[in-house]
Amino acid sequence: MPSTIKDVAKKAGVSIATVSKFINGGNVLEENRVAIEEAVRDLNYQVNTVARGMKTRRSMTVGVLIPSLADYFGVSILATIDSELFKHGYSTIICDYSEKDPKSAQAKLEFLMNKQVDGIIMQPINVKPEDLDRAEAQNTPIVFVDVQVGNKKHDSVLINNTDITMQITQHMIHLGHRRIGLISGAAGVLTTDDRVAGYRRALEKAEIPFSSDLLYLVNISEESGYAGLRHFMKLNEPPTAVFTTGHDLTIGALMYMNEKGIRIPDDVSFVGFENQTIARIYHPKLTIGVQPIRRIGHTAASMLIDRMSGAYDGEGRIVELKASIDYGASVQDMNAK
């Protein structure tokens, strides 16, 4: 005979109400959560999600929407988001959308709303406020990651893009570089604009003139990283150092340098972003800007759970996390020449 919620409560030593609250995504004391999870495993208790959904009018599903399933950042945070949501009884529906199609994000949001998701976590590249109309009309909570959409209704988890780009540019300047190339995403996207602002602020502080030739802003892709490096190397006066602000941009730039036999840091100094694995296997070890991927995913999931459980229903919160620099040997000290 299948175990019941009463059996779980008895074995865990808690009330039926506490087990019910946990199963339905509510917050319970940590010691109770551990006891309930252990009882569920031992008794092989199976939640009747259909019956629960009819009773609570909740589907216990969350939509996760990212620009591309090939995008390193979006895919990297998925595992943490899914794990955190699963602990609270939620499953995920993962969708991607096209940054180039202005209707793609709205269509995928409609799809998720038709699936009656209880909440949405999304990376809103080129997403317009009006795309969110249906979710807002139905009071479906949304948490943004990486990019903030301009209103105070939703929570956001960001990194300080201005600060990390300024730090990396200043690192290169400190080592004697004055012509520094920046390869980033499309202009007009908040993440890109913040990174360009940090780059320009570092140049300004060092009284280095800004040159538009040393900016390559198209999109976050291997193709763009490759083309950006090619563009810089064909300039009459190429940069002595280059910073790529995304994983795929970093891969593309390295592909170009490997194909052309460009040596790091002898021919050009280089700083990448996000990919610590390739940084460690590349020789010499690359200097890399590092996003706190797990903290981003954990924070986004926790904020959404708070909203869905009713633990928080105030104005939109903004959590800004700090990126860091993993120093390698890919930036040459021009002062020593």
Image (spheres, grey):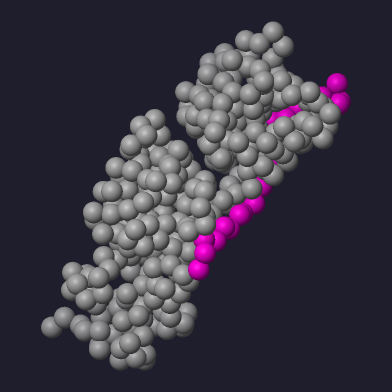
Query: Does the segment drawn in magenta span residue 160?
Result: no
Quadrant housing residue 91? bottom left
Q: Residue at x 60, y 36 (%)?
A: 193
In front of the other: 249 or 186 = 186
Q: Work out whether 153 lies above or below 18.
A: above
Question: At 52% across and 48% down in the image, what residue appears?
Answer: 150
Look at the picture and state if 121 lies above or below 72.
below
Q: Please report the bounds of the magenta region as a residue range.
A: 314-337
Give coordinates of residue 120: x percent, y percent: 38, 56
Quadrant of the rendering where the C terminus is positioned? top right
- Tell me: residue 106, above or below residue 331: below
In the shown orientation, is residue 198 left or right of residue 304?
Answer: right
Residue located at (64% from left, 52% from top)? 322
Left or right position of 89 against 272: left
**Is 325 part of what is drawn in magenta?**
yes
Give the image location of residue 280, x and y in percent: 60, 38
Q: In which quadrant of the rendered image does the N terminus lie? A: bottom left
Q: Give the residue at x 86% y 25%.
A: 336
Question: In which quarter of the view is residue 69 placed?
Answer: top left
**Left or right of residue 307, residue 50 in this image:** left
